[in-house]
Amino acid sequence: MFDDFFLISFVPILTGLFSALSCTLVGNILVLRKQAMLSDTISHVVLPGIVISFLIFGNLGSHFMLVGAAIAGLTAVGTIAVLRTYTSMDNSAAMATTLSVFFAAGVLMIELTAGGNVHLDVEHALYGNLESLIWIDGESLMSVFDSVSRQTIPVELTRAIIGFVLIASVMFVYWRFLIVSTFDHTFAEISGVPVGVVSAGVALAATNAAVISFDAVGSIIVIAMFVCPPAAARVLTHSLRDQVWLSLLFSSLSAVLGYAVAGYVPILLGFETSISAAGTIATLSGVILAVAIFYGKRQRSYDFLDGHQT
């Protein structure tokens, strides 16, 4: 069963891992800013951009598809800002409205073109295609060091790695601006921090993470990784540095163990087929969050009792 690991599982695991890490990095900032709903909105609104790009260029691997999805995401962020500024809608209502309209438009476009040359479908949008990322020249670990074999690695993995490195690098360079504008908006403005630019940068980073991850892992994992690992880490610590590292650990565990459970446990139990990797990864991230909440409450109860005893 494990003989074909590098052929079947190596690329999907790494793609899910780096996609999860990218979303989690940005998710930490969104959770701290109380903008977790923005991740849900962006991960859905990129769909019409992907469909339109596919209809124009006819290739899911096209870089124009990523551009189209990014434009859709940024357009949605702009739409939310307009609704919030020029109507009586609050932030949540504006996000919910934008999410519904954009995602519905994407689904409608898929349905209307179902008889044509479009092989996108709603299931693909929700669950991605992790299981189909087969590395045809992946025979062993040595294949990683073979230049010829590396050429057949699915492009989704390359995108996920580049996206993670890019997002991590930008956040590392501008970390001070991010933190100051997140925790003290007024002080940041007085100090000369371009708060509007930083907010737009956070939205752009969230859009990039969602776009890069969307095709491979689907919207379910994208939403889960934006929110669950950072929220679980936040429950366990008040240290921002510890929160970031814990969230990355939780997202890594969710991605790797989730894929392993989905792909191998059903077969070990005697079933003929595996289960959805995307659904399992997202579910495991939710389980980790639930455990973190339970442990955090229990720890606070012990601290409360110890304080009264002393």
Image (cartoon, grey):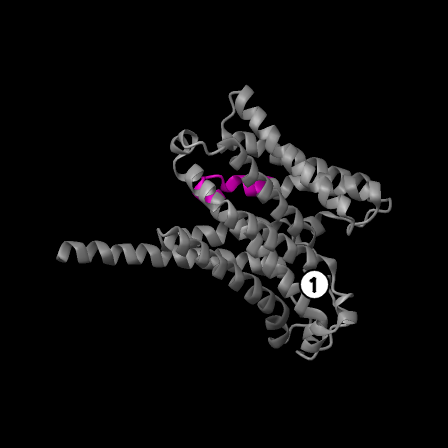
Residue 283 on image: x %, y %: 54, 57
Q: Is residue 12 visible?
A: yes
Quadrant of res 268 = bottom right
Whether residue 31 sits left or right of residue 122 in the image: it is left
Circle 1 sits in a helix, a strand or a loop, which is it?
Answer: helix
Q: Residue at x 29, y 58 (%)?
A: 299
Q: Is residue 110 visible?
A: no
| Quarter in which the C terminus is drawn | bottom left
Residue 217 on image: x %, y %: 65, 55
Asked if residue 67 lies in the magenta stretch, the reply is no
Quadrant of res 269 = bottom right
Dot 1: few (<14), some (14–19), or many (≥20) neighbours within 10 Å? many
Q: How many marks?
A: 1
Segment colored magenta? 30-41
Q: Is residue 171 above or below residue 151?
A: above
Q: Residue at x 57, y 59 (%)?
A: 281
Give the residue at the far right of this rendering. Answer: 116
Main SS of residues in magenta: helix
Give the residue at the far left of this rendering. Answer: 310
Whether residue 260 sits left or right of residue 308 in the image: it is right
Tag 1: amino acid: Glu
Q: Is residue 162 above or below residue 191?
A: below
Quadrant of res 186 = top left
Q: Nearer the viewer, residue 285 or 139?
A: 139
Asked if residue 36 lies in the magenta stretch, the reply is yes
The residue that disc 1 covers is: 131
Whether residue 241 sits left or right of residue 285 in the image: it is left
Residue 296 on image: x %, y %: 34, 56
Q: Nearer the viewer, residue 297 or 238?
A: 238
